[in-house]
Amino acid sequence: MSDFDIRRLGGRIGAEITGVDLGSELSETVFREIHAAFLRHQVLFFRDQDIKDADQLAFAGRFGPLSDPHPLMRTLDGAPQVIPVDGEDQRADHWHTDISFTSTPSLGTTLRSVVLPPYGGDTLVANAAAGYRDLPRELRQIADRLWAVHTNRAEQPRLGTARGDAVREAFMATEKRAAHPVVRVHPESGDPSLFLGGFAQRLLGMELRESRPILDVLQSYVRRPENTARWTWRPGDVLIFDNRSTQHYAVNDYDGHRRVLHRVSINGDVPVGLDGRTGYAIEEDDR
């Protein structure tokens, strides 16, 4: 493809891919370049894609097996691997890593614009590996030894509507917890990153009141402006982010307008810490 190009959006995260039709079958050569860019830039953006759910599923499937239906969110009838991210259901205006409250959080997530508001509704993605690199040496040494308890009941924003309250209640009805190293080693690049986000409720072995100040300090390094990319959606846009080394945030500034994205995620693996220990689900008896 003579017009294939990778355009960096910032020095630390994000690139736009041009000259690619995600509705066609990508050659191995082109996909290898996209995959390398995915690992390097953490989040990739594609404009002007005239595709459907089947095309999105096929593209996401090139990165690995697709996730089973989300354990807590509704999926499309007849397409259980597609989640309609609907602003009338919930608005994820908090930094988070997808399903980090499970033992195997997603490898990555694709999002496709379906219905867009006339303004607002941007998506922010933060480079958690850059956040780790920014830590002062003394703070990094502390983070290297910490583990966090992630739960679906942590930091769930309220939408304030009957439908939103019902979706929130369903999301939190069955409690899921997992313990993961605060510093996760990327299974492909080998880079360490801060594996936290809004589902990280407390530090293992500490109470909530003891954990919160430490978690807030570590999080502040991830969400530094220079470590983030901000995407303003247009019709036909698609993005994919590396869920193993990023966090993301949906900006809730589009008032009562509709915003619907279709989400397809890729199966992940168990997070591994610097010492080689692996994350695990917390069973009822362990709580």
Image (spheres, rainbow, N blue to C red):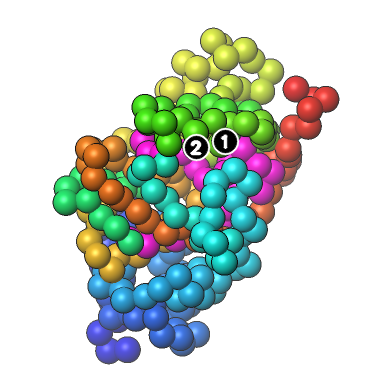
From the top left corner, tell me how far across and down residue 205 is, in percent: 69, 18
Residue, disc 1: 170
Residue 100 image position (x, y, % from top left): 58, 41
Instruction: State the CA–CA distance, disc 1 to disc 2.
Output: 5 Å
In the picture as drawn, the residue positioned furthest to the front comes out as: 162
Location of mark 2 (residue): 167
Q: Residue drawn 66% across and 31% down? A: 175
Q: Does the magenta portion include 239? A: no
Q: Relative to residue 276, is residue 201 depicted above or below?
A: above
Q: Quadrant of residue 67?
A: bottom right
- Indicate the amino acid at tag 1: Ala
Check if mark 1's residue and mark 2's residue have beta carbons within 8 Å.
Answer: yes
What label does residue 123 carry, if any? none
- Asked where in the image residue 282 lies, by quadrant, the reply is top right
Q: Is residue 224 visible?
A: yes
Q: Nearer the viewer, residue 253 or 21?
A: 253
Dot 1 falls on a residue whose secondary structure is helix
Instruction: Give residue 164's position: percent from left, percent from top.
Output: 42, 35
Q: Which residues are magenta?
A: 90-113
Q: Residues within 10 Å of mark 2 (few under 14, many from 20)?
A: many
Tell me which residue sits at (58%, 31%) in the image: 172
Which residue occupies 40% across, 73% down? Answer: 52
